[in-house]
Amino acid sequence: MNPFDWIVLIVTLLCTILYGLYKSRTTHNLDGYFLSNRSMPWGLVLLSIMGTQASAITFISAPGQAYTDGMRFVQYYFGLPIAMIVICISFVPIFSRLRVYTAYEYLENRFDGKTRTLTSFLFLLSRGLSTGISVFAPSIILSSLLGWNIYWTNILLGGLLIIYTMSGGAKAVAYTQQLQLAIIFVGMFLAAYMVVNMLPENVGFFDALHVSGKLGKLNVITSGMEKADGGGYRFNWSDQYNIWSGIIGGFFLALSYFGTDQSQVGRYLTAKSVTQSRMGLLMNGLVKVPMQFLILLIGTLVFTFYQFNKAPILFNQSQVSKIENSPLKDSFYLARDAYDSLSVQKQSAVIAFSAALDSGNEFQKASTAEYLQTLQKKSDSLRAKVKGWINSKQVGGDGNDTNYIFLSFVVDYLPQGLVGLLIAIIFLASWGSIAAAINSLASSSMIDFHKRFTRKKETGEDQYKLSKWYTLVWGIFCIVVAMFTYNIGNSLIEAVNVLGSLFYGVILGVFLVAFFFKNIKNGSAVFWAALLGECIVLLVFALAKFKVIALGFLWLNPIGAFAVIGFALLLNAILKRKRAIGEINTI
Amino acid sequence: MEKNDHKSPFFKSWNSWYVLVIAVLALLILFFYLFTKQFS
């Protein structure tokens, strides 16, 4: 980065911290610190919900995901709008009527204390770990691309936000998220504009779409069906992103995330009325899918850009250095030379395809597209081979470079100033989601554990001060997790979602029983059902991980939810019968 | 949420909002389907 980029980066980050501190003034009690005195309008609630969900990983990984796998990832969000409706109908009025601070508070009211403790513990565990990954994810990419020390990057990325989060609680989080999202949208729009602008003169936006589409990147809707061995078609259960896993699995994931994860519940509890809360959630349901579509579209435009320009065989240079210092280096150099030569051929082929598009000659279009697809297949196979070598024991690296693609493009091709702005965006997006997560971890620790188990009499001021300490402790915890996180698999956005899916389904199951199975009143039945449900989810996950069964991770959410409902019904019936027999014996 | 204000803005009832959200999702899926067909 040059000095101008540094200035843009530092000024943007400083302004955000100062703005957060400026908006920190709130009443010195739990209502003020965790719920902004329940005074937020729906616009702020919406931006806070969006800023909490969209982490740096969203802006780094999603374009890379589109570059490698196409746009089908957008289907993952199809269940979200439906989940928003269910939450508006069932969750919001109950949380509002009971005036809860955390979602789990309601469960004590409905069942018993141990069910509340279990669900809030599962939340603290999953959210604490995934927030640590959210700190690490952008840190490793920035440190690798810009040569920054990973430990210092973790501390800066996870630490600076603690200043305003600790000082101003939910109010500072919401106001900074508003500013952060505004800067993020401007930066991403400029990046998209620059990609299209940097394409050859005679290649426009729609030509770029035709190029990426012909090379399989505009696969927005996929059915998940594949050819069966004996002829015909069958549904591929291990396919992660298709319209069915998106609508069904995505619905359960979104319902659990927005309805039972305190990092989101805490955002709409800050609204000044049920109406404001509902409007924030419904607007999120309206804008989330198109927003994600546009972010993915940037990835496909970057892909098209690299059809006209030389793309590296692997975007993660630290992994390239690893293979260059391994016994496989000669094979790697051969593959790289072949890839470069294919890249030159592709450049001519894509120019010929663009010319065919302009001429309108259908035969020319079909033949040039076919040739381009053949070259792309060869390139993909070489890239896959190199990734396999890097993953092998001889190299011992991580061949997945999805998270490096977009930022490599930014650093290598975008003009001065914009690079600094886009690096700042990574920081701001991280801060938005991490700050909300830390705030919610502190509120759950304070409300669901400290307040219930402490014997000391505390004033509102004492609790306010203690909440600040909890915020600091969780901030440090997340940085420590980030320091120990490495090689967590495929794409980082996926790693966070997989971790969430291990717990979300079960937590959701408990809430679904609470809302929709009024005859189940026995807290012990729900408590044990949750534990058994979690065992089932972990077992299914292990079976899928070791390839005993083929199942995409999104399916873990409905499995967890239905397992809890099933076990709760069963155990409730058994306990009811036992009690009835006991009563008869007493008589 | 301080006030128990449940009134739906712009529409008479919340059901209209829910229908709108579902309709927009359906239209988006249709648009994405046509988009995929057009460019792939």
Image (spheres, coloured by chain):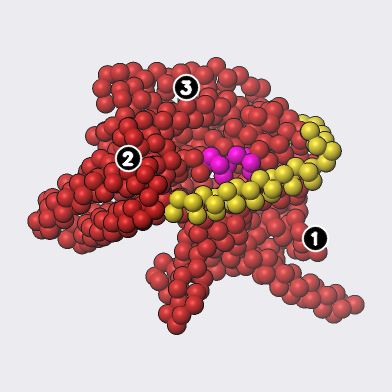
Chain colours: A red, B yellow
Highlighted magenta segment, given as a residue range? A284-292
Q: Earlier in the sequence, mark 2 or mark 1?
A: 2
Q: Magenta residues: mostly which secondary structure?
A: helix
Instruction: In the displayed orientation, state which residue is furthest to the bottom.
Output: A230
Q: Looking at numbered disc 2 in the image, what kind of residue is underneath it?
A: Phe
Q: Looking at numbered disc 3 in the image, what kind of residue is underneath it?
A: Ile
Q: Looking at numbered disc 1 in the image, what kind of residue is underneath it?
A: Lys
Instruction: Check contact, mark 2 vs mark 3: CB within 8 A.
Output: no
Subunit under mark 1: A
**Residue B26 appearing in the image:** yes
| Residue underneath mark 3 | A17
Residue at (25% x, 59% y) in the render: A378
Subunit under mark 3: A
Helix, strand or loop at mark 2: helix
Viewer-side label of 2, 1 = 2
Q: Which of marks 3 and 1 is nearer the N terminus?
A: 3
Q: Is residue A576 left or right of residue A405?
A: right
Image location of residue B17, percent across then percent down: 75, 42
